[in-house]
Image (cartoon, grey):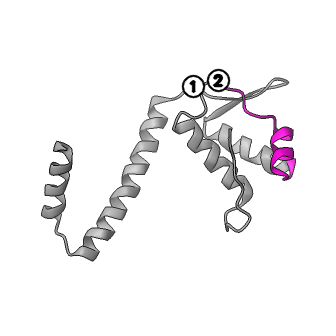
Amino acid sequence: MYILIDNKSGAPIYDQIVAQIRQQILDGSLAEDEALPSIRSLAKDLRISVITTKRAYEELEREGLIYTMPGKGSYVSPRDPQLMREENLRKIEDAMRDIHRLAAQSGLSMDDLQEMLVLTKEM
């Protein structure tokens, strides 16, 4: 597992940890039931507070991405197909917002966009 903390980012450190672990779980870089570093170990490696890493792990557990076994550690949860679907829908919605913005800047109509969608499906 690789996590990079950007101290110049306006995002809180725990949010950066959550986002990066979430992404690694969703893209398959972290496998189901794979052990995560202990809270203390991760805090030491990143040179941050144990409280910060604990908060990140708690958030990931609330989201259902990891589970914790007392005395044993935290692990990647089995993939929930509904969770994967929701994550993909969110990505599609983000991409569509970008497409809409670019289309407006380029003066494209909805018909133009629909035609482009059909053409890209055929590629």
The amino acid type of the residue labelled 1 equals: Pro
Can you name the residue that lies furthest to the front here?
A: 123
The amino acid type of the residue labelled 2 equals: Asp
Residue beneath the point at 77% across and 34% down: 37
Question: Which residue is denoted by mark 2 in the rendering?
Answer: 33
Q: How many marks overall? A: 2
For the magenta stretch, what is the residue range? 33-50
Numbered disc 2: secondary structure: loop
Quarter-of-image position of residue 32: top right
What crowding class fits label 2: few (fewer than 14 Cα within 10 Å), some (14-19), or many (20 or more)?
some
Question: Which residue is denoted by mark 1 in the rendering?
Answer: 78
Query: Which quadrant is the N terminus positioned in?
Result: top right
Q: Position of residue 54 (x, y in %)?
A: 80, 44
- Residue 70 left/right relative to 93: right
> Which numbered disc, 1 or 2, marks the residue that appears first in the sequence?
2
Residue beneath the point at 81% across and 23% down: 72
